Amino acid sequence: MKKLFRILAVTLLMLILGLFVFYLIKNESLPQGTDGPEADNLTLEMMESLNKSAWDTTSEVSWTFKGIHHYEWNRTENSVLVKWDENEVLLNTVNQTGVVIHPEKIREEGKEKLIKQAFGYFNNDSFWLCAPFKAFDPGTERSLVTFKDGREGLKITYTSGGSTPGDSYVWILDDNHKPKSVKMWVSILPLGGMEFTWESYLTLKSGAMIAQDHILYNGVNIDLSQIN
């Protein structure tokens, strides 16, 4: 029994050391950027590559986030129906109110909890749908950065709004200014500079382009499906 405990203790220690080394290797400090007209122009070029003008005229869009949260977003009416498990909540995206459609019988405090939960899901999951189109939202700052590996990026910092103001994202663009990945410095992730791909583009009926796959470390995929 003592031998088993020693093996478990050594295994746990090695795991902790491995995670610590992984953290030291992967964790990055947020790079300082240079703001100004060049950063704003590159942002406009990124948006143009994805047909931002078409996104602006997209009245409705629906999608499923990682197969668990489904959204039916009426952008004209500023409403979104959020579905997960047995829950259905209709949100007003302007005045931050909501109505619980299902379950029908629920206490008032339960309704408030579900509405808050639905807004949290929507704020997070809609990022993966349309983040590049939000780079000029109120409270955003844009700048150009250069990484140690020589790659250049477009940093967008959200100083206000959303669920986690203060988060920063650095977009890595291809030769046509289309996003191919994004590095994140956000409060909900344990490491700074985690990089997700932005790929498998789909063109909506309106003409706007949406990335369906966002892969981390060649493994985890934050995928969007049933985009319509």
Image (spheres, rainbow, N blue to C red):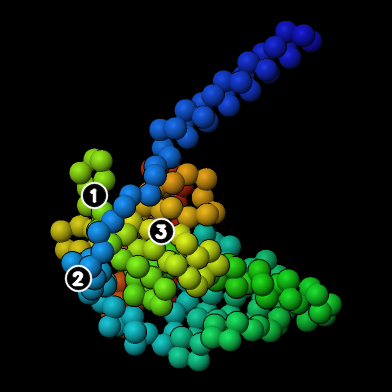
Spatial CA span between label 3 and label 2: 19 Å
Which mark is first along the chain, 1 or 3? 1
Query: Residue 16, position in %: x, y?
Result: 58, 26
Above or below residue 78? Residue 34 is above
Give the secondary structure at mark 3. strand
Tag 1: amino acid = Thr
Tag 3: amino acid = Ser
Above or below residue 141? Residue 20 is above
Q: According to the image, label 2 marks what residue?
A: 37
Number of marks present in the image shown: 3
Q: Residue at x 63, y 23 (%)?
A: 12
Task: For the residues labelled 3 and 1, say whether their Cβ atoms are less than 8 Å apart.
Answer: no
Q: According to the image, label 1 marks what residue?
A: 146
Spatial CA span between label 3 and label 1: 15 Å
Q: Residue at x 16, y 63 (%)?
A: 176
Query: Residue 204, position in %: x, y?
Result: 34, 77
Tag 2: amino acid = Pro
